[in-house]
């Protein structure tokens, strides 16, 4: 048997992404970036719901000590954990007015599944229509089996943007200004 190595100098420019159109990669990048935006929004929503919850005076010190780790997790958790953290923060807030929370959580969890495929899939050579089948197997050994093209990616990107807006609205519906924005509502300030 003769040993062989890959001739890196002979690889096409852009390998292994050279078979897809620049438009495909641009749309995939925009879609993935929108998921990053959703993660930021969820973290800020967790901050909003946990910062505005009222406590009895005897509970304040303990709640404040628990709050810092909660916020640290909101900065570092992956999307699935952020969704669970958001759910907990909304459900624990006695004055929360989120309409159709269960439906929003369902949409968030479905989006998280799509994110994993888009971010972690290995993209096969596209077909004549520019659609590609990402190689992706989830933790339950489910194999993703759908071809993805630019139109699909545009649809997912728009859907995730709309879900992000629903999360923002869950905060602003309470009358608060969404953190980091200059939008309407009462700014959230922290005092102990």
Image (cartoon, helix red, strand yellow):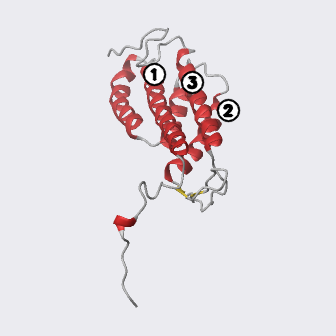
Relative to 167, residue 4 above or below: below
Q: Nearer the viewer, mark 1 or mark 3?
A: 3
> Is residue 61 rendered to the left or right of residue 106?
left
Numbered mark located on residue 48 in the image? 1
How busy is the neighbourhood of tag 2: few (under 14 within 10 Å), some, or many (20 plus)? Answer: few
Which residue lies at the image location 43% right of the left edge and 12% below the top edge? 182
Query: Where, quadrant-wise, is the C terminus in this rendering?
Result: top left
Which residue lies at the image location 37% right of the left edge and 13% below the top edge? 189
Specify which label sits upstream in the sequence, 1 or 3. 1
Relative to 138, residue 41 above or below: above
How busy is the neighbourhood of tag 1: few (under 14 within 10 Å), some, or many (20 plus)? Answer: many
Relative to 43, residue 118 above or below: below
Disc 1/disc 3 C-alpha distance (Å): 15 Å
What kind of element bears circle 1?
helix
Disc 2/disc 1 C-alpha distance (Å): 20 Å
What kind of element bears circle 3?
helix
> Is residue 70 rendered to the left or right of residue 184?
left
Mark 2 highlights which residue?
103
Residue closer to the observer: 80 or 53: 80
Numbered mark located on residue 165 in the image? 3
Q: Position of residue 76 (x, y in %)?
A: 38, 40
């Amino acid at each position: 048997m003769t040993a062989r190595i890959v001739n890196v100098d002979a690889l096409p420019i852009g390998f292994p992404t050279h078979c897809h159109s620049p438009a495909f990669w641009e749309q995939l990048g925009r879609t993935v970036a929108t998921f990053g935006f959703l993660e930021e929004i969820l973290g800020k929503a967790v901050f909003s719901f946990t910062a505005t919850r009222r406590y009895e005076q005897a509970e304040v010190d303990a709640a404040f000590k628990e709050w810092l780790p909660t916020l640290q997790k909101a900065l570092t958790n992956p999307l699935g954990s952020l969704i669970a953290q958001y759910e907990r923060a909304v459900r624990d807030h006695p004055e929360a007015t989120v309409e159709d929370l269960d439906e929003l959580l369902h949409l968030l969890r479905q989006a998280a599944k799509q994110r994993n495929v888009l971010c972690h899939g290995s993209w096969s050579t596209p077909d004549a229509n520019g659609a590609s089948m990402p190689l992706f197997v989830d933790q339950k050994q489910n194999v993703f089996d759908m071809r993805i093209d630019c139109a699909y990616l545009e649809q997912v990107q728009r859907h995730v943007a709309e879900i992000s807006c629903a999360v923002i609205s869950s905060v602003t519906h309470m009358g608060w200004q969404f953190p980091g924005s200059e939008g309407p509502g009462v700014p959230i300030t922290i005092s102990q």
